[in-house]
Image (cartoon, grey):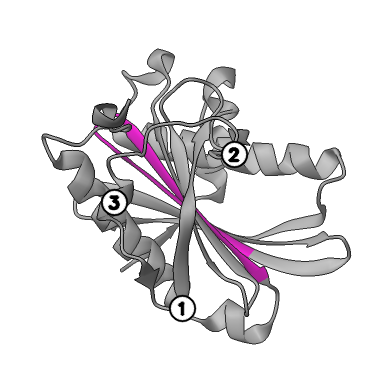
Amino acid sequence: MRLFPTIALLGSVIFSTACATTPEPQVEEVAKVPAPEPALYKTLPDTVASFERKGYKHFEDGSGGYSVRYSNDRKRRIADLYIYPVAEENVDLEHNQLVMGSTRATLMAIGEATRQGHYSNFNVINAATRAQGLRTVARVQATYLRENLASYTLVYQTEHKGTLLKIRVTMPDNEFNRKSAEWDGFADKMFKQAIRSLDSPTDKLVDTKSI
């Protein structure tokens, strides 16, 4: 699919401070605070290419958002899928504005983590958007150092009917990982599955039947 450069657009999108903190939420361990299983979780595959599903965590902010982790422990690769509602003050924004604003907020959050010393040498390699039918997907590639280990990360973001979806894949920075098409395939499959689940009349962000 055709990619469209979007770095300038990311810098020009005006987005609320409240939403800016949402893409990188603090999460709590399910084992410590029991929480209902997200309805979407049971619809996700156990494995996707070289990744295995490891579990889910709820956001601490009471929004009903959560993340689902996949990983390849042997290759030191981690992929997190984030599902969370659009902030109330942003519900009137158009789809493209939500995607661009959420992506910009993610970059700002990573930049803030860098300033706080969690990362160093953070560098955006490329930021672009692509059209998938009526849907816009933002894709950002970046590198950074953490504990002197060079890492390569990709962030994919989109929005669907008031729900923001983000995938962040992180792995060692090497030529093979940079060139692999697996990460794009993983993101595409996970977004499609998540959107199908969200469109189901019985599915919500959280499965209230288990409360």
Please name the predominant secondary structure of the magenta segment in the image: strand
Identify the secondary structure beneath mark 1.
Answer: loop
- Comes first in the chain, label 2 or label 3: 2
Separation of residues labelled 1 and 2 (CA atoms) = 25 Å
Q: Which residues are magenta?
A: 153-171
| Residue at the limit of the structure toward the left, as seen here | 201
- Mark 2–mark 3 contact, CB under 8 Å? no
206 on left or right of 128 = left
Residue 116's spot in the image, x, y percent? 85, 38
Residue type indicated by callout 1? Ser
Q: In the rendered image, which residue does mark 2 sit on?
A: 29
Crowdedness of circle 2 by 10 Å Cα count: few (<14), some, many (20+)?
few
Image coordinates of residue 70 in percent, x first then y, are 49, 62
Of the residues shown, which amino acid type is indicated by label 2?
Answer: Glu
Determine the image quadrant of residue 104: top right
Camera-side mark, 1 or 2: 2
**Which residue is denoted by mark 1 in the rendering?**
50
